[in-house]
Image (spheres, grey):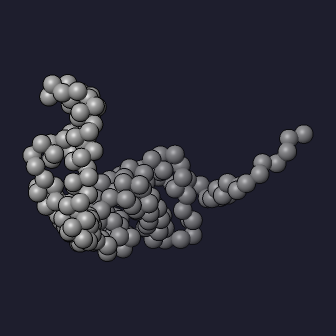
Amino acid sequence: MKRPRKGARRAPASQHPPALATVEAIVTERRLIVATLVASGVPRRDRADVVQGVVLGAWRSIKRGMYRPDPAENARQAFRKWLHGIAWRKAWHYLESAYVRHEILSAQPLGLLREVVGPSLEAQVEAREVLEALTELEPSQREILLAVDDPEPLTAYAARRGMNPATAATRLRAARRLFALQLGRRR
């Protein structure tokens, strides 16, 4: 014996017989579709694409026999209600899609931020002090301090200058000491 399936059950199908409608009937209700999309918040630039999706979706549903109006109800009113439901669902799917939710289109996106972007004013002042202290050093000391930031090791720097690596290390220590003194005087 087979166990019943867990989870949500499928909605019961309409008991009414399927009805046929033409593409022309769908297109004549284009104003209803556009009004539904406007009310749902679909932007103007994407409305034509979503309208096309609604028309195609409605046509495919009719071909599959999913349009089953109540024969006791007015045919046009039933068709408009059914088409409104399709347009509403297409608009909702469009608005919930990832590329619509996460894309921010703005001429000045930094104007939307509530926090300061970039380094703070204190960090900028401190960086300026460091640069001024660096410019007051002798060119050879400045050069060896900046060589530390290069991706190549200090031994390669010493080999390029034709000096002993130990001498380069000693000059680096002396330049660091003088640089620390320059910074200490400024603060």
Relative horizontal placement of residue 83, taking residue 35 as reference (left or right): right
Q: Quadrant of residue 38?
A: bottom left
Residue 47 can be seen in this image? no
Residue situated in front as seen by the camera: 100 or 130: 130
Relative horizontal placement of residue 26, taking residue 140 as reference (left or right): right
Relative horizontal placement of residue 138, taking residue 89 as reference (left or right): left
At horizontal 45% and vertical 47% (from top left) the residue drawn is 60
Residue situated in front as seen by the camera: 14 or 85: 85
At horizontal 22% and vertical 55% (from top left) the residue drawn is 179
Question: In the image, is residue 40 above or below residue 101?
Answer: below
Residue 25 in the image: x percent, y percent?
36, 58
Residue 80 in the image: x percent, y percent?
43, 67
Residue 130 in the image: x percent, y percent?
20, 60
Q: Residue furthest right?
A: 1
Q: Which quadrant would the C terminus be assigned to in this image?
A: bottom left
Residue situated in front as seen by the camera: 12 or 126: 126
